[in-house]
Image: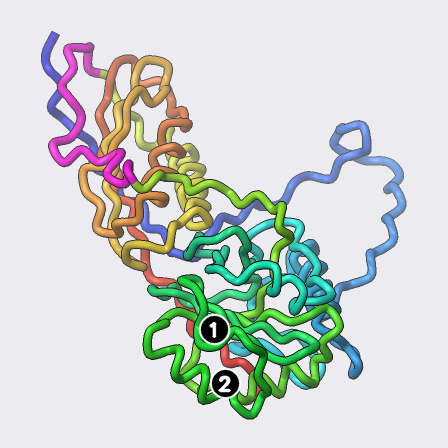
Amino acid sequence: MATMSKRLFLVLALMACGGSDPGEAPDTEPGGETTGGGETPPEPPEPEAVTRALAPDATYGDLVALARALDGASRADSDAGCLLGPDRLAADLALPLRPLPRPIPSLARALARHRGPMRVLSRWGQRGAGRRAVAVFTMTPRTSGEALLLFAGEDGLRLRATGGEAGSPEPFEVAELAERVRAARATVSGPVVLVADAGTSLARVRTLLAALPEDAVVAFGVLLPEDTRLPEPLVPTDQEEAGLCPDGLPPTEAAEGQFDLAAARSTLGELQAQVSRCNDYRSGRGRDEGTLTVALRVGAGGAVSAACATGDTVGDPALRACTLGAVREVRFPDPGGVVDLAIPFRFEPSPLGRQAPLCR
């Protein structure tokens, strides 16, 4: 049998923030049968819509509860470009874990028990070290460097960084906030994450947001309970080159099959949707845009017997691992032999920008 050398080159373009439209499912009865003619079953009552409105006396606990409700109602997305308005939560939300924990009653007591560095868990993965962690639940642009944590407790304000303390551990007042944040940002280049007690009024939160430097990337977060188990990185740090094969797949002596592109279109569409969801597993390293070129071998029956990345200009090992996993799980129409394919997945930059702290 001849050694395989011919490859089919397919192109799939993926937006870095993209997803797929699942389409509409047919109406079904509770038993699973599709409804046909005859009487139309009564419509269930419409659930009460979740709005982004906040009461005048709302607290940070109310804000977090609303974020949870919006996420549960699939209304987390927002293009307002700001975090908090006079009477509404305007932020584009991105919960890194579900359910999002409620804010704790006293940050002062929690921080007194833990004075070391902290971790931050966000849409872009984890950064920092330490036993305690903060979950960022509003979307931010992908940034490098340590994050600066601003804790608003009943006894004042404190600054921490994911690399350790950021200035004095003693509480301070809002009049000192801008100067302290500017000093900390000389060595901390990541976002400023605001974390407040559950009972902190949103009036005070707005005051703090207004005092931050105008060019700061700001997000909302909650301090996670001590026993929270954070997700493990998809790719260990000592395996970040895994899945790369610059020279392509090894040759095979198997009989060559015939790939039917027309019959495979729906399969390719499903694969594109699966790879698009891999953006949720990005580690935060690498570039926002680039091409991940995957070499794959389709065998008898249509199963993918091998897959690796011949090129990766994005450079995010978690994105690569997830993409290769999605490719290996897909099943194509039976080619009647072995077919080698090359699929470049194009990732384009997300249009997401910095969200202003306050809506004007």
Type of the residue with mark 1: Val
Type of the residue with mark 2: Leu
Distance (Cα) linking label 2 and label 1? 9 Å
| Picture quadrant where residue 270 is located | top left
User: Please, what is the dominant secondary structure of the magenta stretch?
Assistant: loop
Viewer-closest of 122 and 208:
208
In the image, is residue 2 above or below residue 151?
above
Q: How is the image coloured?
A: rainbow
239 falls in the magenta region: yes
Q: Earlier in the sequence, mark 2 or mark 1?
A: 1
Residue 112, x across and y down, in percent: 61, 64
Can you name the residue that lies furthest to the top here? 1
Quarter of the picture containing the N terminus is top left
Tell me which segment is drawn in magenta: 238-256
Residue at which label 1 appears: 192
| Picture quadrant where residue 52 is located | bottom right
Residue at which label 2 appears: 212
In the image, is residue 87 above or below residue 69?
below
Residue at 38% across, 32% down: 325
Quarter of the picture containing the C terminus is bottom right
| Picture quadrant where residue 186 is located | bottom left
Viewer-closest of 319 and 169:
169
2 and 1 marks in contact (CB < 8 Å)? yes
Residue at 24% across, 17% down: 338
Residue 18 appears in view = yes
Residue 10 appears in view = no
Residue 144, x across and y down, in percent: 34, 64
Residue at 23% across, 32% down: 295
